[in-house]
Amino acid sequence: MTNSDSYCHMRIPFFLTNNFNSMKKRTKTKIIVGVALGAIMSIMFTSCEDYFDVKPKARILTDDHFSRESGFKDQLTGVYTAMSGESLYGREMTFGFTEVLAQNYGLEAESNYRYAAQYDYENAVTKNKINNIWKKTYNCIANLNVMLEYYETVDSTIFTQNHYNLYRGEAIGLRAFLHFELMRGFAPSPESNGSALGVPYVTEYEPKVTPRKTVDETMELVIADLKEAIIYLGSDSIYGSDTPYIYQEERKPYFNYYAAKQILARAYLWIGDMENAAATAEEIVSVYELNNVISWVYYDQMMSVPNEQVNRIYSNEHVFRLDINNMNEIIKRYFTKEGSIDQFTFTEDQVDKIYEISTEGLGNDWRALFGFSYDGEKQYLWKYYQGTYKNMMPIIKKAEIYYIAAEAQKETNPARSIELLNIVRSNRNIAYFELSPELTTSEIQEEIFKEYRKEFLGEGQLFFYYKRLNIPTIEGAPVAANDDVYVWPLPDNEIEFGY
């Protein structure tokens, strides 16, 4: 393979996306995937030498695209739309692939997820899911990098209000978040092997191979980007407004100030930096508790309201979510009797085990009371029920920051850890059954595990909890858990071309 062969290969995957046609139908955005599509498609059928004849035309198109504020806004909207696709957070990175890996579901015998549940990453169906996660995530990152490169030359006066800093902060924060997501999937955890290679941390839109750094070094890049994003997002209305309630709903579908702060705390926890994880998490908790900027779900949103109005998704508590227009059609395929062979079910014993329903008082937990429903003879997860609170896919939630603060302080301040867990429990309707103040460190960690399993059921987070701590057993798994389970294989073409 020549250098020029590699040069061409690495440019093409960043822009190609199977979602482009559906994105055009769902949004009027003109992200670079769309603007430069003709140029990029021609690359597929030309030599590397011919590529340079195409580039000037694509450059003219992109220059025009980013000559006005709307181009930057549209670019971000396009990335959010791509993230909402079923290969990413519209399914596989939430209730689909990553949740199956946590062994919470009952699966049909012929389910396309049965091999994923066995951690058979070489199965063609499973491999395709993994490859699409890689490809489409890097596609989003490439589009963010195109936008960020134009920030180096753009005239800031084309932006209104606080949007110059806001859009820049969103883009940098999303770039960090998406790289972190790739690290959680495709690289060992720091607890397992911080010296192993991470994923390529791509910060330029250039036709070249980005060298991989170690897991520890790559996480430093994630944290650096998040810190920079937080600076720019200091102008975010969700953070600085005198009337935050008005703006909190408007800013939740965007990677906002508190999203960046929470992911920073998550990153510190991921690398085992408990001091910074605790400090960052407690800072956010204090704001949430004092200003109620991200409120807990209200009692009257859960009790004494018609079934279709119950707030099962806890929309108040979303820090960052994606709005998915066709979510009802997606959910029906997996969580109703009308679903395909890929439907996900729960037995009474499974629900009892997860939510400890047999334990006195814990059966009143809203997550259990309103989180499941029978449809025909089978029981399904019902948190995504499309009633009043519809088309919402939570990506970052308020409760997580309490769990991070609790775990980070379980040894230095166990009383505070227990207090934080009890705050969440009280907002899940089990306030009268507080955790004992006498819990040991290991018992606190066990309660944190239970909370992750309860709170994030169907959201794809539990598998990464297991992985972060390098736990040797995933409950219900057919094999022992190690990096053969925890690390997803890179796509074959990436290995072939240098990774």
Image (cartoon, grey):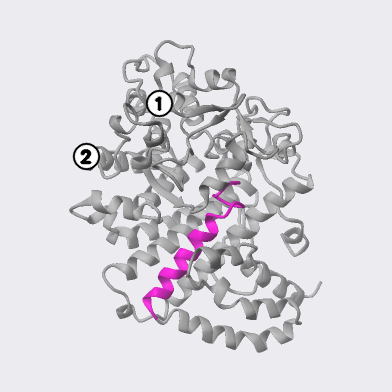
**Residue lying furthest left in this view?**
242
Q: Position of residue 485 (x, y in %)?
A: 69, 38
Give yes or no for contact between labels 2 and 1 (Cβ–Cβ under 8 Å).
no
State the residue in front, 270 or 292.
292
Circle 2 SS class: helix
Q: Is residue 403 above or below residue 28?
A: above
Gap in Å between the C-alphas at discs 2 and 1? 24 Å
Q: Main secondary structure of the magenta part?
A: helix
Asked if the magenta segment contains residue 72, the reply would be yes
Dot 1, how many residues are within 10 Å of its Cα: few (below 14), some (14-19), or many (20+)?
some
* Figure quadrant of residue 35: bottom right
Q: Identify the residue position indicated by label 2 in the image.
A: 290
Q: Position of residue 119 (x, y in %)?
A: 72, 37
Name the image quarter holding the C terminus. bottom right
Circle 1 SS class: helix
Q: Is residue 95 left or right of residue 435?
A: right
Q: Which residues are magenta?
A: 68-92
Q: Which residue is at a point 49% across and 17% down the rendered structure image?
A: 356
Q: Amino acid at mark 2?
A: Leu
* Figure quadrant of residue 2: bottom right
- Report if residue 264 is visible in the image: no
Q: Is residue 438 left or right of residue 241?
A: right
Asked if the magenta segment contains residue 436, the reply would be no
| For discs 2 and 1, the disc positioned in front in the rendered view | 1
Q: Which mark is residue 366?
A: 1
Q: Is residue 401 above or below residue 106?
A: below
Q: Is residue 196 left or right of residue 237?
A: right
- Precedes in sequence: disc 2 or disc 1: 2
Q: Position of residue 1 (x, y in %)?
A: 81, 71
Q: Which residue is at a point 61% across and 57% down the rendered structure image?
A: 213
Q: Amino acid at mark 1?
A: Trp
Q: Position of residue 143 (x, y in %)?
A: 53, 68
